[in-house]
Image: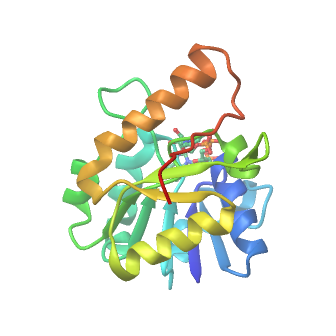
């Protein structure tokens, strides 16, 4: 799969590394490629030909990204990992959907710390990744990207379930940071087989 990772911070570079290891063609898009300390290119170049796009920039930078690149993002499968920490919702789905009306939006990789994305086996158990977004062929692509990172995929519904996904993120914050359980903390959903 051709994957564009927008943002070369801890989340972007962790997922880019995992997907590259699994044979995907990953391009990392940044604002200043010359200043990047990993192979990276301009955002518009990274988006060219992408089957899926990961947004891994600060939540506060999303509007700026959309102002610059909405045309190139629209119509694509967009996995939004951003969190607008401190705002009433961590996601910005209504704003993103309004700017990218033809995009197939998912909220994924936003519910756990990057440490879990880098090392998803915790206490011998594979952590789950709670996400929402499209089903069908697009949903299968999202699931492949999740399982290739080593996480177990738990889809909670379409993109309208973004508040539910926010809830999982808030639970992670409350336990990992609020209760001091540490950032290498995963969530696992149990059910009868
Ligand atoms: N850290 C975690 O454990 C974690 C886990 C799950 C989700 N998240 C969420 O995922 C997102 C990324 O987190 P992170 O920890 O990887 O952030 P980070 O380490 O601060 O990196 C952010 C990246 O975004 C780039 N960026 C900033 N503004 C931009 C803009 N306007 N256009 C394009 N690129 C821009 C930065 O590049 P420059 O060098 O150009 O500034 C940097 O490469 C955040 O929304 C965060 O809330 C974080």
Classify residue 152 as left or right of residue 94. Answer: right
Residue at the outermost top position: 179
Residue 59 place in picture, x, y as percent? 44, 40
Please state the total of marks drawn on the protein image: 0
- The vertical placement of 114 against 137, above or below, is above
Q: For the point 40% across and 48% down, which residue is it?
A: 62
Classify residue 96 as left or right of residue 178. Answer: left
Q: Nearer the viewer, residue 176 or 190?
A: 190
Residue 71 place in picture, x, y as percent? 32, 72
Residue 36 place in picture, x, y as percent? 74, 56
Q: For the point 69% across and 70% down, which residue is it?
A: 19
Classify residue 101 as left or right of residue 36. Answer: left
Q: For the point 74% across and 54% down, which residue is it?
A: 35
Query: Can see residue 158?
Result: yes
| Colour mapping | rainbow
Q: Quadrant of residue 46?
A: bottom right
Query: Can see residue 40?
Result: no
- The vertical placement of 79 against 64, above or below, is below
Q: Nearer the viewer, residue 156 or 15?
A: 156
Q: For the point 48% across and 69% down, which residue is it?
A: 142
Residue at the outermost front position: 192
Instruction: State which quarter of the image contains the N terminus.
Output: bottom right
Q: Quadrant of ligand 1?
A: top right
Q: Nearer the viewer, residue 77 or 136?
A: 136
- The vertical placement of 125 against 22, above or below, is above
């Amino acid at each position: 799969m051709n994957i564009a990772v927008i943002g070369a911070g801890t989340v972007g570079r962790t997922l880019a590394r995992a997907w590259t290891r699994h044979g995907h063609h990953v391009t990392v898009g940044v604002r200043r490629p010359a200043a990047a300390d990993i192979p990276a290119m301009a955002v518009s170049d990274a988006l060219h030909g992408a089957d899926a796009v990961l947004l891994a920039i600060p939540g506060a930078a999303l509007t700026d990204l959309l102002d610059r690149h909405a045309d190139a993002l629209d119509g694509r499968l967009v996995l939004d990992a951003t969190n607008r920490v401190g705002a009433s919702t961590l996601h910005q789905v209504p704003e993103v959907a309004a700017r990218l009306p033809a995009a197939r939006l998912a909220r994924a990789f936003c519910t756990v710390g990057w440490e879990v994305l880098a090392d998803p086996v915790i206490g011998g158990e594979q952590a789950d990744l709670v996400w929402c977004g499209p089903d069908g062929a697009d949903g299968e692509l999202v699931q492949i990207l999740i399982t290739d990172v080593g996480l177990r995929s738990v889809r909670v519904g379409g993109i309208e379930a973004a508040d539910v996904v926010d809830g999982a993120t808030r639970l992670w914050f409350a336990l990992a940071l609020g209760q001091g359980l540490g950032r290498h903390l995963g969530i696992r959903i149990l059910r009868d087989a």
